Amino acid sequence: MPLETTRTIEIGAPPEEVFGWLVEPDKLKAWTDADSRFPPDRSELRVGYRIDGSFPGPDGERRFTLEITAFDPPRELAYVETYAGGRSTARYALAAAPAGTTLELEVSADQAAPSTSVPDAVRAQLAQLPEAQRQLAEQQVTAAMQRVAAYDSTTDPRVQEAWGKKVDAELAKLKELVELVERER
C-alpha cells in the first residue's frame, strides 16, 4: 500500500508563473529538496520525457527512471518515478482563481526495496573485530537486516505523518517564494 496524499493551496500569482516553479531546475530546487534533472529549457519537456538517474541509498547507488505522464502548461504536470521496489507518482493541477492560482497536488509513493547488503564500511569494521566479537556482531547485523526487510514504512503512522508534514512544508515554501517574486514585480 503506498503512501498517498492530496493537498490544495491557493497561491497569489497566475498559473503561468506558478507552473515555472514546478519545472525550472533552479526554481524547483528553491522549494523542494529534490535534485531536479529537468532541462534548463522547459520547451524540451513533453509527455514521455524520461530521466534516468541514481541516488545514494544505504547499500549503494540506487537507480530510478522518471517519466512525464501529463504535460499541459500551465494547467497540469504529472510524472511517475520507478525504482527498485516501487514507484512514486505526482500530479500538479493548476487552475486560475480570483487570488491567483489554485494548485492541487496528488502524490503517492511505494516503499523502496530495502537494503539487501551490508554497507562496505560496516563490513570493514566487522573484519577488524576479534573472532568471537565479529561472529556476534555479524549475527546482530543479519538480524537487523531481516527486520529492515520486513518493515513496511507505508503502514507506519509516524512515517505517514512525517511525509504529510514534508509535503505541507514544501508547498508552503513554494507559496512563499512565488508570492515574494510576484510582489517584487
Image (cartoon, helix red, strand yellow):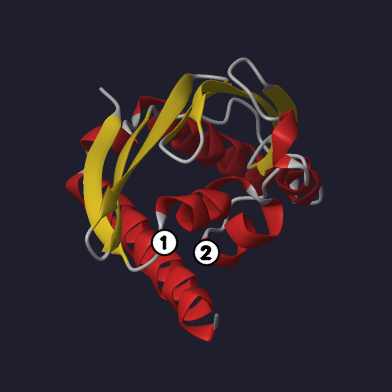
Answer whether residue 1 is visible to the viewer in this image. yes
Under circle 1, the secondary element is: helix
Residue pointed to by mark 2: 31
Which image quarter holds the N terminus?
A: top left
The mark that comes first in sequence, 1 or 2, is 2
Q: Quadrant of residue 104?
A: top left
Does residue 46 appear to the left or right of 40 in the view shown? left
Q: Amino acid at mark 2?
A: Trp
x, y (%) of residue 86?
46, 20
Residue nearer the viewer, 126 or 103: 103
User: On residue 170, which mark appears?
Assistant: 1
x, y (%) of residue 75?
41, 37
Give me the residue at 63% from left, 23% from top: 46
x, y (%) of residue 142?
53, 31
Mark 2: few/some/many CA within 10 Å (<14, 14-19, 20+)? many
Under circle 2, the secondary element is: helix
Q: Residue furthest bottom?
A: 184
Give me the residue at 67% from left, 36% from top: 59
- Residue 23 vs 13, above or below: the answer is above
Residue nearer the viewer, 92 or 159: 92
Q: Amino acid at mark 1?
A: Glu
x, y (%) of residue 168?
30, 60
Residue nearer the viewer, 113 or 77: 77
Q: Quadrant of residue 51?
A: top right
Q: Residue furthest top?
A: 48
Give me the residue at 25% from left, 66% from top: 99
Does residue 80 appear to the left or right of 27 in the view shown? left
Q: Mark 1 and mark 2 in contact? Answer it, CB < 8 Å.
A: yes
